[in-house]
Image (spheres, rainbow, N blue to C red):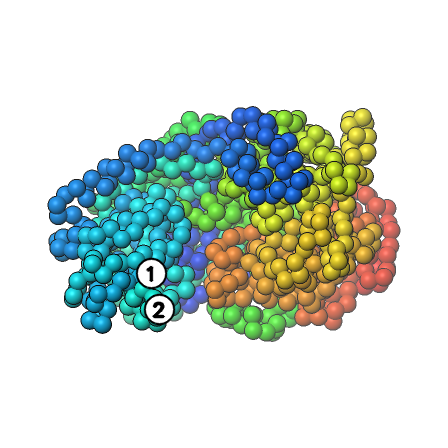
Amino acid sequence: MPAKSPFLKLSVGLALLMGFTAIHAQDLTLWYDKPAAKWVEALPVGNGRLGAMVFGGVKNDRVQFNEETLWTGYPRNYNKQGAYKVLDTIRGLLFAGKQKQAEELAGREFMGLKSNEGNRESWLKKVQAILQLKNNPSQAGYNDASWKTMAVPHYEGWETRGFEGMDGAVWFRYQFDLPAKWKGKDLKLDINKIADQDFTYINGTLVGAQANADARNYVIPASALKAGKNTIAILVINFSNKGGIMGYKDVSNHIGVYPVNGNEQEKLSLNGRWKYFIQDTDVPAVGQYQASYQPFGDLNFLFDINESGVTNYKRTLDISRAVATTSYVYNGIQYIRSYIASAADQVLGVHFTASSKKSISFIAELSSAHKAGRVKKVDGNTLSLEVNVKDGALKGVSYLNIRAAGGSVLVKENKLVVSGADDVTAWLTANTNYRNYKDVTANPFQLAWAGLAAVKNKTWEQVDNAHVKEYQSYFKTFSITLGNKQNGRSFLPTDQRLNSFAQDNNDPGFMALYLQYGRYLLISSSRPGTRPANLQGIWNDLLSPPWGSKYTTNINAEMNYWPSDLLNLSATQQPLFEMIRELSVTGSETAKQYYNAPGWVLHHNTDLWRGTAPINASNHGIWVTGGAWLCDHLWQHYLYTQSTRFLKDTAYPIMKRAAEFFHSFLVKDPATGYWISTPSNSPEQGGLVAGPTMDHQIIRNLYKSVIDASTILKVDGEFREKLETQYGQIAPNKIGRYGQLQEWMQDVDDTTNKHRHVSHLWGVYPGSEINWEQTPEMMKAARQSLIYRGDAATGWSLGWKINLWARFLDGDHTYKLIQMLLSPVRGGAGSYPNLFDAHPPFQIDGNFGGAAGIGEMLLQSHTQHVDLLPALPSSLPDGEVNGLKARGGFELSIKWNKGLLQKVTVTSMAGKTLNLRYKNKIIQLPTEKNRMYQFNGELQQQ
């Protein structure tokens, strides 16, 4: 079990003294009146290390589970040795305006190293040997009677057709009748996308072959066609990620054939069930820049139930206790299942009860999407699941133990069979051989078995009580009530409530629930002693998840932790801080090999193995301020807690070394004489450039933090002076010809650009150098940029814009974007039925960004003042929040009515001077450590 963090003490210090609203008075339950049919309808539980998605099925209850250290890849060197030798050339090309040439050179010589690749050529040769047979699958007369069928096309890959994790060589065959009027004509075969490679035949004649992401539009010569039935045979080669005949994203646009030079409206659709044959799945390893987070397995409980006889069905997630439940009535008996992910005992648990004795019977089975997964009997009531990650160093083991009171448990065909029980408890453990990013020598069998042994003599009640107590030590540090509970819509199932909230704004309690759900997700995916929350927190069911479900450090990884200090969850940052420490080690080698510089650097992604080199492509993968942004989390934590011990022992050494890198890395712009960052990019648009605005904002922020920290600690005076000198000469923010804040050194912003990233607004949020007090004109320009960029966005981008509009002090616009975020997914951004954020697809950062943004409406402390209700929307006239944190070491409870502050309570955790502001009223008050101060709506001390 991970050790308790000292950060927790800072979070819970005076919670009981604050007179918090009782937990049960809040609206803290997600609930549904039907089982989950899709993964994004299932309910998440997690303990920071283990995560599970609970489907709550009646006939088949799926519990899909993860263990945080099961990833692809292995410990290795990610850095290209001596890459810095082309750095000056790349810079010179950019200064000369030759962006394309700079990107081409950087793409060849400046990217990170991929993992080892297998021998693709020899494998393809083996696969294609089947074509040497006289009767082979490409031929029209081939006997495919024994082949199964698959729906084609499948734009999201054959993984969506039940073939998760399948890579390899797969034959597809389909027949169509040639219209008589097309006789003698060449036809166009419009297949569009195939992943990754294809060899396409018509009646045994090869008509096309490609190994790229381009559309497949092949010409079928009339000579290859015949009257009546014609056979299309496609050998699809897929090496990794999504595979298959993908067709079009727009499902109304079918794949098909039609005459060359003819009307596409004549297209003969080839959508349908194609026959398929899996020839070979033993594909060679594919080189990857970075690793991907993996699912571990599935636990399915199978019940002999006629679903039509089920009544009173309900599944819930109580986020005040971190307990999910499924309940229903069948044959007059009420059945209840409870699910927990205990951090106290490091197990996943499921408890089954019934209102009548000897009524609980089911089959429990373990499985995994991993090809090498194996299920074995351990003893009469225990199974094991062993998994090995393909082409990787990690392996894992999970144990499932079932105990039944009154009834029997036995193992049959590697499944656990429970019969006639009164009460049943299932415990699941999972561990891997991962120790740290350099060491994979842990024994997962011993670890997983020890976890099972730890609960061997405990009752469900004992484990559940310990779980709830541990969880609430984090959760109960904060409470929020918005609006009048009597007017809320908690009586609606959560998916219906989501739809209702999107249509009007008459359910403020739903916003409070969403904020608390964000806190729940952060606690569940990031506990002291675990790894940080990744792109999907800790929950993932795919072997090839979107963006690897890793850590994207040009916004997404950082956004995960925006709520942590503000919403009184400081302890959840400990895994992030440990990752930053590890990255500062691996990033030192990257700084040396790519920039011949001291200190450390991180580009726009990292993974379990702490890769820091540039990845993917030079037009977006060379972005140098990931580490500097992460350093801001260290500094912000100090500002919130005022812990000089944390600053001295943890934060400052890492921050200083990041500043050392940039002091060496920055170069003089030949056109302006400013110090600028190059090569880099404004995340994910505009290509490789010299001097993106975001970089300079982040670097200035880092320098200022290091300057202030070294002053507080009274160290490194000489280095501080160097930073102070360079700080004032870094290229400044500039206002462009449209009144906008420029995204680049040049005034080239496009007012019609609706890109999801709003990187040049970093200085507004999460930074603070652009604000209404010190830089009002620049603040107006930043707001104009955001107006041009528009409201519509991906889910995480909405999360960022919510915080930006809160900083612009426009509460109603902020609320509008919250409504957009809390809208059902209909092809674009929003929230899934389980309230997971939709990019789409699912990314958890939007949940955290949205939660932080709601807090930012109610309290801001990034300037010299602690501002109360700075961006309160008209739709939230009444409310109360307890446990908000402010920089300077303060914890606040705020109550308002009819849009006006009623009272505020401030606890000083560090004894600093309090500068409190509400509207135009400001008070300054020296405070004593651990003392509580109360004020009325006029900021008069009570």
Q: Residue at x 65, y 58 (%)?
A: 750
Estimate the x, y position of residue 861 in percent, counting from the top left. Answer: 76, 51
Q: What amino acid is found at the position of numbered circle 1 in the picture?
A: Asp
Q: Residue at x 34, y 57 (%)?
A: 217
Say which of 437 and 480 sits in front: 437
Estimate the x, y position of residue 538 in percent, counting from the top left. Answer: 48, 46
Residue position marked by numbered label 2 in the rendering:
264
Q: Residue at x 59, y 39 (%)?
A: 102
Q: Earlier in the sequence, mark 2 or mark 1?
A: 1
Say which of 514 and 402 sits in front: 514
Classify 10 Å Cα crowding around label 1: few (below 14), some (14-19), many (20 and above): many
Left of 232 or right of it: where is 29?
Answer: right
For residue 813, which quarter of the picture? bottom right
User: CB of mark 2 within 8 Å of CB of mark 1?
Assistant: yes
Q: Is residue 589 above or below residue 195?
A: above
Q: Is residue 41 visible?
A: yes
Q: Residue at x 67, y 39 (%)?
A: 95
Estimate the x, y position of residue 689 in percent, counting from the top left. Answer: 64, 43
Residue position marked by numbered label 1 in the rendering:
190
Which labelled disc corresponds to residue 292? none
Gap in angstroms between the C-alphas marked 2 and 1? 10 Å
Q: Is residue 22 above or below residue 434?
A: below
For residue 585, which quarter of the picture? top right
Could you tell me which secondary element the residue under label 2 belongs to?
A: helix
Q: Is residue 561 visible?
A: no
Estimate the x, y position of residue 20 in percent, counting from the top left. Answer: 67, 56
Q: What amino acid is found at the position of numbered circle 2 in the picture?
A: Glu
Left of 485 or right of it: where is 67?
Answer: left
For residue 182, which quarter of the picture? bottom left
